[in-house]
Amino acid sequence: MSSKRQAMVSNVSSSDIPIDQLPGLSQQEQSQLKDCGITTIAALGQQGKTPASRLALASKLQIHLQYVNKWVALADLARIPSVGTQYCGLLLHAGVCSVAQLATIPTHTLHKQILRLQVATMQRRDLCPTIEQVQQWSKQAQIIQNSEFRIQNFTPVS
């Protein structure tokens, strides 16, 4: 990988955002997650990687699995620097559940979905992110997706 490409991938990596910044979590839920050792969004993403681990976490927290699935989806989307905790909820409400899904959705289609959502819920077009912002989200999602694919398929030379 070229040094320019490596710099792009390292700039587009998940940061350790505190769990209390994830939208939709009550104080009690934040405390429960912290009691389980989950203090950052990245830690939530790690502990919620598989359906079995999400089920185990839901059982440990004594909450319905759908909440854990929602939190893990929000955490996944928040890994994208230009999305972060500011837009991860908007994307989830627009039907985007993961970085992988965001990387594949055509930008204009997604922008149209978000615009419809904003107008339907807020009655305001001006609150919709610009097409350029949506393009940036998509590009960063593709970079993250491609870097993860390379890591997963890495075979060391013997």
Image: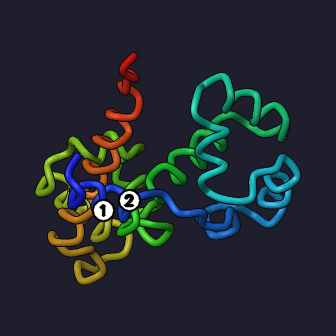
Q: Left of 31 or right of it: where is 104?
A: left
| Disc 1: which residue | 7
Q: Position of residue 15 (x, y in %)?
A: 53, 63
Q: Residue at x 74, y 59 (%)?
A: 39
Q: Amino acid under label 2?
A: Ser
* Picture quadrant where residue 7 is located: bottom left
Secondary element under disc 1, as helix, strand or loop, is helix
**Which dot marks residue 105?**
none
Q: Left of 61 or right of it: where is 106?
A: left
Q: Are marks 1 and 2 in contact (CB under 8 Å)?
A: yes
Q: State the residue lying farthest toward the top.
A: 158
* Picture quadrant where residue 158 is located: top left
Q: Left of 31 or right of it: where is 1?
A: left
Out of 120 and 131, give the one closest to the viewer: 131
Q: Residue at x 22, y 65 (%)?
A: 136
Residue 36 position (above or below residue 17): above
Cα distance in 3D space between marks 1 and 2: 5 Å
Secondary element under disc 2, as helix, strand or loop, is helix
Q: Left of 65 or right of it: where is 113?
A: left
Q: Residue at x 36, y 25 (%)?
A: 153
Disc 1 residue crowd, few under 14, some 14–19, many 20+, Cα 10 Å: few
Q: Amino acid under label 1?
A: Ala
| Disc 2: which residue | 10
Q: Position of residue 156 (x, y in %)?
A: 40, 23
